[in-house]
Amino acid sequence: MPTRIDARFKDLRAQNRAALITFVMAGDPDLSTSLEILKGLPAAGADIIEVGMPFTDPMADGPAIQAAGLRALKAGTTLKKTLKLVADFRASDRTTPIVLMGYYNPIYVFGVDAFLAAATQAGVDGLIVVDLPPEEDAELCLPARAAGLNFIRLAAPTTDDKRLPKVLENTSGFLYYVSLTGITGAALADYSGVAEAVARIKRHTGLPIAVGFGVKNADNAEAIAKTADGVVVGTALVAALKNSLGADDRARPGTVSAVTELVAEIAGGVARARARKPDSAGSPLGKFLGTLAKVWS
């Protein structure tokens, strides 16, 4: 059965537009502000929202997202409260896909069956669990798919053609291509290899390919959205949130808008990537050539 993620990518294909996928940490800097940010993301241009599950040992994340997780934990955010945050978002938004992203330990402690039941009830659409390889699919991936959730896998520049089929085997929703080797927040100096990587992956799958890591502004997003099916931005949003906080890491009046305004700016870059050129058929020369074509047909 198609999920909200499947439906969203189908709609975007019809619009000839890539998806803007935004990452924010649940409970950063507090649960009420976090909810307001979530509510503001779709109107700002987010097509899919990734919600981070705070964890004490986020091995794949850079300093900005690690700090966001620590702020969230300090504010009392738990996995149970993260799921309630999603449920509260769903009370006013039934269409925007939500993906939970994080690590397996909190899910394991919660209990896989209990977690999947609670996530489904809250309105979660997919999962990205970065420390569970395909060899461990029976642990969470297969039960998640049986529960109706997409299980989204990551691929990297080091994922060669021999490894890729295994990575894709039970992946659904979309494939998240990490455009560089390293932790979140690292800069991508050259986007020329992204198109080639996306084309290579597409030879193995019909899934949408979303590209993340290194996206900091509208120009970065535009460059990626020309060939990828989705653009993922996270660290830049987390940094914008952090920069808006008071000295005590408390939200200020401009905290929500600091995130949503950056999302709107980046969404503009995504939209420009495939903007149709003016139709030359409407020009005087175009009309003349059209007339000739009819005469000689």
Image (cartoon, rainbow, N blue to C red):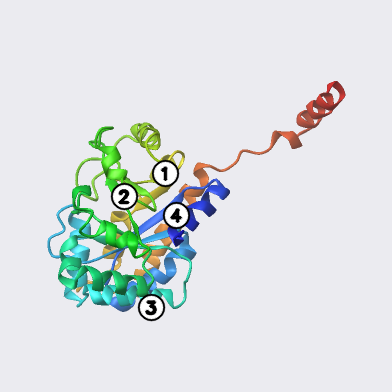
For disc 4, the marked residue is: 265
Q: Which mark is residue 88?
A: 3
Structural crowding at the residue carrying mark 4, measured as other residues with C-alpha within 10 Å and reported as few (<14), some (14–19) or many (≥20): some
Pick out the residue farthest to the left.
57
| Residue 172, x across and y down, in percent | 37, 52
Secondary structure type for disc 3: helix
Seen in the picture, residue 74 relative to 66 is either above or below; the reply is below
Q: Earlier in the sequence, mark 2 or mark 4?
A: 2
For disc 1, the marked residue is: 219
For disc 2, the marked residue is: 170
Can residue 188 be seen here? The reply is no
The Cα–Cα distance between marks 1 and 3, rounded to whole angstroms, is 33 Å
| Residue 129, x across and y down, in percent | 24, 57
Residue 128 placement: quadrant: bottom left
> Are the two marked residues, 3 and 4, in contact with CB atoms closer than 8 angstroms?
no
Residue type marked 4:
Glu
